[in-house]
Image (cartoon, grey):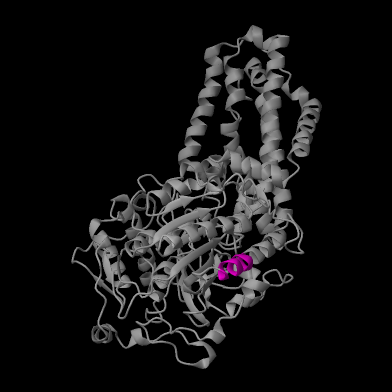
Amino acid sequence: MFATLPSSPPSLRQRFRPLWWLGILYVVIGALTRIVLWKMSGANAPLTIGNLAYAFGIGLCYDLIALLYLAWPMLLYLWLAPPRFYASRAGQWVLYVLALLLLYGLLFVAAAELVFWEEFSARFNFIAVDYLVYTTEVIGNIRESYPIGRWLGFLVLATLLILLVTRRGLRTRDSGTKLRRRSKVVLVWLVLTVLSVFAVNGSVKDQMANAYVNELAGNGIYQFFAAFRSNHLDYARFYKSLPDEQAFKLVREGLQTPDASYVGTDPHDLTREIRHSGPEQHLNVVLISVESLSADFLKTFGASHGEITPHLDALVGQSLFFDRVYANGTRTVRGLEALSLSIPPTPGDSLIKAHNNENLLTLGDIFNDHGYQSDFVYGGYGYFDNMNAFFSHNGYRTVDRSDIPKSATIHSANVWGVADEDLYTLALGQMDEIHQQGKPFFLHIMTTSNHRPFTFPANRVPQKNGSREGAVAYTDWSIADFIERARAKPYFDDTVFVITADHDASSAGRSSVPINRYHIPLWIYAPKHFPPQRINRLMSQMDIAPTLLGLLNFNYRSRFFGYDVLRVEPGRERAFPATYEKLGYLHGDLLSILEPKQRVEQVHPDFDSGDATPNVPIDQSQVDQAVAYYQVAAYLFKHGLLVRKPADSTTVTPLTPAAAASSSTPAASSSAPAPNGSSAAPAGTAPAPASASTAATP
């Protein structure tokens, strides 16, 4: 990078000497940051010679590449400043001020990386880019979570001290270099910068089996801009593909279930009529997607910490409880996408935030077609993550923090939203209003309390306010309180409570897609209608919507990618755990991962630790299934084929009992075991009503 400078004339070397000052300091800051991050990783990043050599060797390369970009402000000054001004006292002070600002920025970014790593165990990535849009929430979250004033003051002192100690590296002289000669250095720097853009990308470092070591080998600033460039990833351009005809054929075959029949022969149309025998149950539905509710918080799944979810653990024995549900992603918008659209996650941005995402066929639309009022209720301001814009244009009425009357009691609030109990008060008001209109209601509630800074009202739980355990305990308390308040309502007996998570509390793991970081719980609680039962079948987050509609015995038109897992044949279950660029397909004990540049990884995941063992040779049929689902989902959205059509609201005639029996295959009649060792209801029927004895209080 600096190789051209030593052979240049002495005055030219002096002119550009400050670049050495900046480069040496940046490499030192990068190495120190890497050491601290390694310490924070603990046992997840084993301290071996190979890991050290890789992380610091590759890391140095990324640091130098990032320096090519970061040095441009100083390079431009060194290039353009006239020799007389450059050599003057004023010119020296300009250089000092520029150096001060650059050094402070580098230290600030290093400190920000430590905070980001603590939360996500990763360098800056797509999440950091995403959050940059919402400065109010992000800055507010930082201010509420950390002593930011003290930290900024410390960084100012550190910057001044470092500059004072190293200022000799900035003292230069120039005996009159010509602009043309100085331009040669700038031209070389420009060529190196452009070459780095085309020769290197953020995934080149991902060669080790341990994802932590790969992250440590990266550079936060470089990764940030790499993620910014990949904000929108076109599937057809970056990922392995099949011929469209083959991909659609595989998906249509995969979505052919005992309760579904295609409405036409168009090979690119996934529209199916979902038909059940018997009457529909127009029960009220409350779907709660809880912020960051990992399955491993529950004693039900062997949580090692103190008892922080007693009410939710008790609710397991009073609900339809699904043991093996896996989230689609690691962000709230991915959970909302899966629950409302029942679609695999497309690479890059979620469809919640994509352009041209209006009038898509959603779960809210299907409820509306059956006479419901569908509301999306959020405790914060719904402009965040484009939630209000998406839901209001896709079948829902949006209700958020701005709809809470000024006279209402708010027990606690932070930058993300009001306390969950106040959110549930808002929801109960919506439920009362709709019930008084004589309509059934569907509410999708999105909580916020289980999010840093983890603040909640005092005197609710014994755990410490501001801690993750305290926030989870408060989440547990507030859900139980909500159900108890709803129990006093006239519509309670005919209301179904669906409780799940938007995603796990952590996405970090040693493998590229650590499957244990996608495991979420799911309760379907309606004690007067569905008897308690634990269901141990693999289930995707996008299966929740069609499974719920199946329990209600709804007949409807669908282009959902999810299954009703209570009716589909055993062995066909699959899940779609993904990051913003790594697209996973889990079937059985095999996880296929699609990556940019048409790369494919296939592993046997450890469902407890998240570690993974490579599958050799690769099972091509599983890869083709993964490719087909993701390719078709991206194709349909890109070509406007997920848009709701007038025919989608057409009344679907239910099957007669005889037709239902003739349409079921022998395999389709298999179902999950019922509670107490009894036989479950046959596939194609909803679970039988519970007796009064099953309606225990959570």
The percent position of residue 203, horizontal first and vertical second, equals 51, 50
Q: Residue at x 72, y 61 (%)?
A: 470
The stretch in magenta equals 479-488
Q: Is residue 16 shown left or right of residue 679?
A: right
State the quadrant of the N terminus.
top right
Residue 173 place in picture, x, y as percent:
70, 14
Can residue 147 be seen here? The reply is yes
Q: Label the magenta part by its dominant secondary structure.
A: helix
Nearer to us in this view, 638 or 470 = 470
User: Residue 261: which quarter of the image?
Assistant: bottom left
Tell me what residue is drawn at x 40 percent, y 56 percent. Answer: 598
Percent x, y for residue 324?
Answer: 52, 74
Q: How many marks?
A: 0
- Residue furthest to the top: 84
Front position in the image: 428 or 268: 428
Q: Who's the residue at 66% across and 57% down the image?
A: 51
Quarter occupied by residue 26? top right
Counting from the top left corner in percent of width and height, residue 511 is at 57, 63
Q: Which quadrant holds the C terminus?
A: bottom right
Residue at the far bottom in the pictured view: 678
Camera-side residue: 246 or 642?
Answer: 642
Q: Is residue 453 left or right of residue 690?
A: right
Q: Is residue 167 above or below residue 570?
A: above
Say whether residue 175 is visible: no
Give yes or no for residue 262 being in the magenta stretch.
Answer: no
Residue ID at (60%, 32%):
70
